[in-house]
Image (cartoon, rainbow, N blue to C red):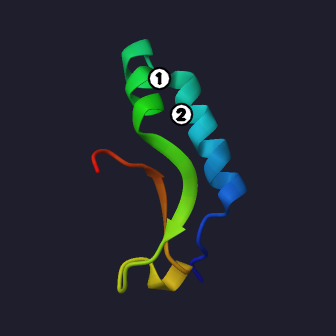
Amino acid sequence: MWKAITEDALSNLLEGAEAEMATPVLAFWEYIRVRPVKWQLPEWGDLGGGFWVVAVLGP
């Protein structure tokens, strides 16, 4: 059965991706990233108790 990714596993994936980012991409990522947080929006993510938000662009 499918299981949602844990916050620790997600953080590890993000850290690995950040290490591979080119300088301009990393600068943009640092501008839009937020601490991972689970958001709720039925029906998307209901199975995993919500979905992880890792970046926000705009208001």
Depth check, front residue: 22 or 28: 28
Q: Pointer 1: residues within 10 angstroms few (<14), some, or many (20+)?
A: few
Give the percent coordinates (x, y) of residue 33: 47, 41
Left or right, 56 with respect to 19, comes to left
| Displayed quadrant of residue 5 | bottom right
The residue shown at (65%, 47%) is: 11
Q: Amino acid at mark 1?
A: Met
**Of all residues shown, which one is farthest toward the top?**
23
Q: Position of residue 39 (x, y in %)?
A: 47, 70
Residue 34, relative to residue 42: is it above or below? above
| Relative height, residue 5 to residue 34 (above, below) | below
At x 38%, y 27%, the residue is 28
CA gap between label 2 and label 1 equals: 6 Å
Q: SS at mark 1?
A: loop
Choose between 4 and 28: the one closer to the eye. 28
Tell me the SS state at disc 2.
helix
- Residue flagged by tag 2: what amino acid is it? Ala
Query: Vertical placement of 25 versus 4: above or below?
Result: above
What's the mark number on residue 32?
none
Q: Which residue is mark 1?
A: 21
Q: Which mark is residue 17?
A: 2
Q: Residue 52's x, y, as percent? A: 50, 62
The reply to whether dot 2 and dot 1 touch (C-beta < 8 Å) is yes
Residue nearest the viewer, comparing 59 with 38: 59
Q: In this rendering, would 57 be left or right of 33?
A: left
Image location of residue 34, percent across then percent down: 51, 46
